[in-house]
Amino acid sequence: MTVVPVYNMVLVPEANIYLKSDNYKNVTGRNPEVGERVILIAMKEYKTRDELTDQDFFPIGVSGEITEVNTANNYLVIRTKDRRNIDEVTVYPDHSLELTVTRRPDTDDLDPEEAKKHLEALKREMIQATAGEQWAGAVRTYVAQINSLNEAAAMMSPWVVESPEDKFKLLETDSKKERMDLEEKMIYENVEINRVNTEARNAQEEDYQKLYREQAIKKQMDYLQKELDDMHPEDVTDLQKFQKKIEESGMNPDARKEADKVLNRLKQEGQNSQESGMLYDYLDFVTSLSWKKEQAKEIDLDAARKILDEDHYGLKKVKDRIIQQIAVMNLKKEQSGSILLFVGAPGTGKTSIGKSIAKALGREYVRVSLGGVRDEADIRGHRRTYIGAMPGRIMDGIEKSGVSNPVMVLDEVDKLGQSYNGDPASALLEVLDPEQNNTFTDHYMNVPYDLSDVFFICTANTVETIPEPLLNRMEVIQFQGYTPSEKFQIAREHLIPKSLKAVGLKKEDIELTDQALTDVIDKYTLEAGVRGLKKRMDTIGRVAAVEHVKNPDKHIVVDSNNLRDFLDARPMTRNKVRDEAKPGVITGLAWTQVGGTILYIETLFTKGSGKVTITGQLGDVMKESAEIAISLVKSLYPDKAKLFEKNDLHIHVPDGSTPKDGPSAGITLTTALSSLVTGKPVTPHVAMTGEVSLQGGVNPIGGLPEKLMAAQRAGVTKVFIPKENVEDLRDVAQEVKDALEIVPVEKVTDVLTALNLTDDAKESKKEK
């Protein structure tokens, strides 16, 4: 008998087993022949003929005979007979097999009538389970030929999901009744599995058919809609416009995914739903943004410098820094360099120079005002879950510019506030950090946007109120106040032509004399910038327009004699130095957010018991400076110490309605007290600035250019400054330095000696 190893098949007696002819030859080494007697043995796991050993088989097999060999279709049929115990397996070197077997009889405990009923029921179930399948007719014909449950189990062999061990149990069972029960259970389970798979497959195919049909219909609709759009472009729907914009926008993957999601939702919701307005606004906003990276342009530095010079007079240091940044951008072909923070008094050109920078770079310009902003959502935007949600001011500015690389001026960053709605200054950290702003996420958009190509410029009147983490991300560039001669040139070159154009006058219609313009600057404006000067020029232009309408042929001349008629205002009261010198009164210099100014430190002894009164709305720093000055004067003039014990001291800084603070009044307070205790007056034409220490040293201060400019305007002729501030004189206009005698000092005694206030101190030391 030929030994035929098989794997994962249902082997039962008295059934037809189907095998491929090629497989038969591979495992036996011979071609099949009708009438050949064989014995089928089951392998525990699949192995090739070359790999088989005597331990690879189950201990029971089944004998049979080849009843059909179909060469055309490459299969053969083996009719099994009875079961055989495999007592011994021998595997020869040529990979042939030899078995020692004994017959294994069945226990005939099956009622033929009962078996027949079970078989008929099973055949009906098999036919019913395959109803509707393409092969249902063939199955019905084949099932009709089944004469026993053994044949049914063998026929189901290729489709059953049981393991080889479970299949072997059918062959191992001696009882025919038990075998029938196992076969029934196996066949019914697999028929049910087949039914479930068929139903699932049919349902899936039905879904696929619906999906294919839907896609086909949509494609047809898109094609027809495109035809209509080409014929009537004015009738294209908003949804189609959004779809086209999204496809052409160049969005990053996250943004494209979110936009498609919102568009699909708008399609499903319909334009009459409650959320359609919000969805529409969102799509309108994100598709209006420029998502594509702008190509770097080559910038002509000479042309850029020319534009800056044409638009703004002076500001050499500022222009040089801007040109440096442009040069770096030219070399790197990308946005580079620090975030610039322009700091200076109002009207000094901080905001307007941003527009000139945009023109020089050939970029779009957008201005974002941050003054008074207290809500973090103004920077990051509102989440779309809120009613009336809007994007933040940064992304709104990007959308208005229409490009991804505008010059964006963030105005008044020093006036950001805080509230329970968050800290907008902290929200700006991500915007202005070059390491983070390439993935800036606005809450309204909910997707990252690249801000790294934006040229950010910030403006402020002072850095005192800007949080340190935000200030560290920016490079501070000081805008000094303008000198009278600079204001004169700015008025001639820029302000007057703009004012005349605004009222419709031509240059030849009106003449403003040089002296009249000088008087406007000196007597009708009091500022470091030119904003007030512009208002005066506008006023002259409007009055001149009235005169021109009344008498078109009249040539209007504005000079010193009729200037007040055109301005309709009194000359402003300026802080001019006094003519009279009194003991205890010294001229000081101070810095404010609108520029420099002079102030007087007034001191006075009155009968009392040593009480000290300080007035003038001084801050804590200036109060501490006053205490240091008192101690210092007591040490310098020990014989005058009784004056402080027997009298009350009153220190006053006039203009009490204006708050004053800062570390620069120490030298002035000390000199005023020295003048008071010595009884020697100091000329008001001498001013000073600097902080003092208890050791008598003069410490450096800030805002020197503005203070010296204020001294010049007020008529001061001599100024004492800390020696460590000498380097700051490079930033002071030459005409200011020419008008003042500037004396650097290291110690308080240097000032007192120069003002002839140390004689008493020396005499006091000798007496002591």
Image: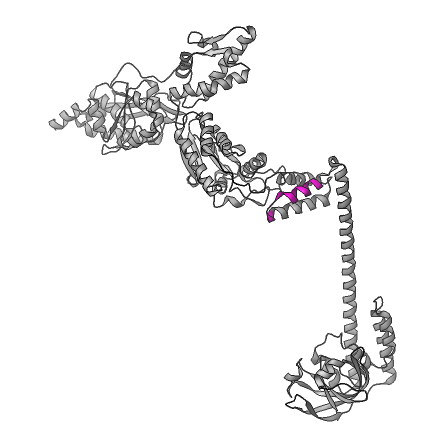
Which quadrant would residue 626 be assigned to in this image? top left
Q: Nearer the viewer, residue 617 or 495?
A: 495
Picture coordinates of residue 199, whole percent (x, y): 79, 64
Q: Is residue 465 visible?
A: no
Q: Is residue 209 left or right of residue 573?
A: right
Q: Could you tell me which quadrant the C terminus lies in?
A: top left
Q: Residue at x 72, y 45 (%)?
A: 268
Which quadrant would residue 11 be assigned to in this image? bottom right
Question: Quick check: 347 above or below 180?
Answer: above
Picture coordinates of residue 133, whole percent (x, y): 83, 67
Is 242 part of what is drawn in magenta? yes
Question: Quick check: 491 above or below 98?
Answer: above
Is 210 part of what is drawn in magenta? no
* Residue segment shown in magenta: 240-254
Which quadrant would residue 610 be assigned to in this image? top left
Q: Is residue 525 left or right of residue 748?
A: right
Q: Residue at x 14, y 28 (%)?
A: 765
